[in-house]
Image (tube, grey):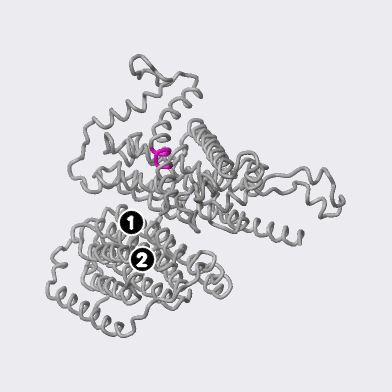
């Protein structure tokens, strides 16, 4: 495939992961933070599938599939929590939900 | 041809990831950038001979999860994050970008030593049949646990999001 | 890409978009008129030549193109522009995996009458169908209108609910055929089985009984899985937001729901998308349940072998190819007629009835179908061992 090797895919995965991590750390909007978490999960999936291809083993793809299942469940439950939070406090800024902070 | 496709898909994936994190105006723009990112990643999976995973990525991630995000954003009629001032942290952003780039470069240096060409895989690698056989023979326990997890998630989501009937 | 694939794609593109899409408007008008004992639209004419009302699609297109394209203030301009295309594109792309026929040897080249004969053909259609949700969902939000937003919420909930039932209803069929590839399904549906073969296995009649051997039924999907055919058809019609499931479109206080802020050609694109999707639904059902491009009780390979001494190999293949396309299109047209029939005879479902049908009726039935099909396959394998 030209000169594209697993190395390139790992770099792309690393970039997407770091962008997602920055999103979680720097954004204050709950929904956008959640989407950044999804980006991180996707980057991990890309890394897994790329290694699976490199080693010729399908275990990476199966683990990626399981990660997708877990991500789907997490999104459902997380969005339910966000709906309850927004209904209660009428704000989507995560700084306003820091009552348990010391 | 495949190299060209790789560059197109990876640029789209990284660019729309930046769009997810960096769109300050409305969460709908972030959600749409997320869709583009998911679709670009699905393209990358298909380039990696992972046909089943790529299609499930489109069906589950781009077709259901982000729809759920958009649904919640529309239902609650969410606009921007309200306190736009809180989003403006130039030092943190600069530092974060620096750490991210440094980390990626360090990763590149570590991985560059072991760049090897890919082995040829048989035509049935990553097909639905191969993944299905592996899932239901070697990993059948994980499938069962995933089923229970999904059930728990469904019940939790319904209970959490219901309006209390007082 | 082989030359044969290129001209097949051009043929399909021309056939679908230029032939089916405008004719579907005429079919809708005339069929509903026939069913309601009236004449239908018959005023449009070119030089006094009315052509049974076939000029009306042309008049519609001229009207839509020349209409003012309004974008409301406060609307998201980019999404307002792009949503119709996101709604239409999946319907057109789904034609990539529809098999109009098998593979034929014509003058040395192997011509495959499927644009992309993917190993995971049906999964591709489902994946593309799940993208179609965005076209409708973003349309209502982009218009900055309360009614549009309500329509969007309803349409997204309806579409993702029926995607679940869509996938599970056909798992039984995949178990029996053992493949996701649509051309393989078409070839497997040419086999026949003896209707009274169980009598022979139960020992009631002896082997080689003439009557038992004579009564054979082609292994069409609808014969093997009758209930899933109707469940799949229901789920697909709900995905298409047509027929009795057009709560998001016709409801919302009788205004047009999620395309309330669209006029002119953008509205036309939504309508086109719906009609093209009717054709996609019919084509998919034909390929999976109604035997695809084959005439019942006729195996195509045997037919070509029987014609070869008479016509020569190339002409036999060509004749078989033309016959296959005709048979496929006839079946598609029958299913289009059937969908129009349902659309014009059933009243619109209430929204909670739609959700009820998707989650409480279709989903348990499809899961039960999987279990029953699995038992059926085991029993058949045991008995015919």
Which one is nearer the viewer's eye here, A14 or C315? C315
How far across and down, in percent of the image, does residue C282 sit?
50, 41
The quadrant the N terminus of chain C occupies is: bottom left
Q: Which residue lies furthest to the top in this view?
A: C48
Which one is nearer the viewer's eye here, C264 or C107? C107
How far across and down, in percent of the image, does residue C174 sit?
58, 56
> Is disc 2 placed on a helix, strand or loop?
helix
What are the residue bounds of the magenta stretch?
C12-17
Residue at 47% over, 48% down: C355
Q: In this rendering, does residue C113 appear at all?
A: yes
- Determine which residue is flagged by label 2: B44
The quadrant the C terminus of chain C occupies is: bottom right
Marked residue nearer the N-terminal end (2 or 1):
2
Residue at 30% over, 85% down: B113
Q: Nearer the viewer, mark 2 or mark 1?
A: 2
- Determine which residue is flagged by label 1: B72
Which one is nearer the viewer's eye here, C319 or B152? C319
- In reply to whether residue B102 is colored magenta, the answer given is no
- Residue A26 against residue C78 in the figure, above or below: below
- Check whether the beta carbons of the residues at disc 2 and disc 1 lie within 8 A of each other: no
How far across and down, in percent of the image, does residue B121 sit?
47, 72
Chain identity of mark 2: B
Residue at 54% over, 56% down: C180
> Label 2: how many residues lie within 10 Å, few (<14), some (14-19) or many (20+)?
many
Q: How many labels does the image show?
A: 2
């Amino acid at each position: 495939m030209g000169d594209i090797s697993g190395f390139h895919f790992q770099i792309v995965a690393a970039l997407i992961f770091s962008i997602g991590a920055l999103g979680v750390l720097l954004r204050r909007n709950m929904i956008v933070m959640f989407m950044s978490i999804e980006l991180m999960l996707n980057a991990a999936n890309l890394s897994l599938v790329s290694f699976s291809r490199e080693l010729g083993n399908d275990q990476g793809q199966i683990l990626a599939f399981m990660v997708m299942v877990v991500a789907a469940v997490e999104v459902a439950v997380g969005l339910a929590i966000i709906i309850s939070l927004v209904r209660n406090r009428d704000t989507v800024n995560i700084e306003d939900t820091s009552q348990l902070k010391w | 041809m495949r190299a060209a496709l790789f560059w197109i898909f990876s640029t789209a994936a990284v660019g729309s990831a930046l769009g997810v994190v960096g769109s300050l105006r409305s969460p709908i723009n972030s959600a749409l950038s997320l869709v583009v990112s998911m679709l670009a990643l699905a393209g990358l999976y298909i380039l990696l001979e992972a046909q089943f995973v790529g299609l499930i990525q489109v069906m589950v991630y781009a077709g259901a999860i982000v729809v759920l995000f958009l649904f919640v954003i529309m239902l609650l009629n969410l606009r921007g994050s309200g306190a736009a001032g809180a989003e403006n942290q130039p030092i943190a952003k600069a530092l974060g970008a620096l750490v991210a780039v440094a980390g990626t470069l360090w990763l590149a240096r570590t991985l560059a030593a072991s760049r090897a060409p890919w082995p040829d895989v048989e035509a049935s690698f990553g097909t639905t049949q191969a993944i299905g056989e592996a899932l239901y023979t070697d990993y059948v326990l994980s499938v069962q646990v995933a089923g229970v997890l999904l059930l728990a998630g469904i019940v939790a989501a319904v209970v959490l999001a219901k309006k209390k009937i007082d | 890409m082989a030359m044969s694939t290129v001209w097949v794609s051009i043929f399909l593109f021309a056939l679908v978009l230029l032939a089916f899409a405008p004719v579907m408007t005429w079919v809708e008008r005339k069929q509903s008129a026939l069913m309601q004992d009236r004449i239908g639209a018959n005023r449009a004419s070119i030089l006094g030549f009315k052509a049974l009302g076939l000029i009306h699609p042309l008049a519609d297109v001229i009207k839509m193109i020349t209409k003012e394209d309004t974008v409301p203030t406060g609307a998201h301009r980019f999404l307002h522009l792009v949503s119709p295309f996101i709604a239409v594109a999946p319907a057109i792309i789904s034609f990539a995996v529809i098999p109009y026929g098998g593979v034929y040897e014509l003058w040395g080249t192997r011509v495959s009458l499927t644009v992309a004969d993917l190993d995971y053909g049906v999964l591709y259609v489902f994946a593309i169908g799940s993208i179609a949700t965005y076209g409708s969902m973003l349309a209502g939000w982009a218009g900055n209108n309360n009614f549009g937003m309500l329509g969007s919420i309803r349409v997204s909930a309806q579409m993702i609910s029926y995607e679940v039932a869509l996938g599970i209803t056909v798992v039984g069929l995949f178990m029996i055929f053992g493949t996701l590839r649509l051309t393989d399904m078409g070839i497997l549906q040419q086999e026949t089985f003896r209707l009274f073969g169980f009598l022979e296995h139960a020992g009631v009649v002896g082997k080689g009984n003439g009557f038992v051997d004579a009564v054979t039924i082609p292994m069409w999907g609808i014969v093997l899985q009758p209930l899933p055919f109707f469940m799949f058809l229901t789920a697909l019609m709900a995905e298409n937001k047509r027929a009795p499931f057009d709560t998001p479109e016709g409801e919302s206080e009788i205004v047009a729901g999620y395309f309330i802020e669209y006029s002119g050609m953008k509205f036309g694109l939504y309508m086109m998308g719906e009609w093209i999707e009717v054709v996609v639904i019919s084509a998919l059902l034909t390929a999976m349940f109604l035997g695809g491009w084959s005439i019942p009780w006729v195996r195509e390979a045997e037919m070509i072998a029987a014609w070869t001494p008479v016509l020569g190999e190339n002409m036999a293949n060509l004749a078989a190819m033309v016959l296959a396309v005709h048979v496929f299109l006839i079946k598609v047209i029958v299913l289009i007629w059937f969908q129009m029939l349902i659309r014009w005879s059933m009243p619109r479902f209430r929204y909670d009835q739609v959700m009820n049908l998707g989650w409480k009726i279709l989903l348990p039935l499809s899961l039960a179908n999987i279990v029953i099909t699995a038992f059926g396959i085991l029993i058949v394998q045991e008995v015919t061992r």
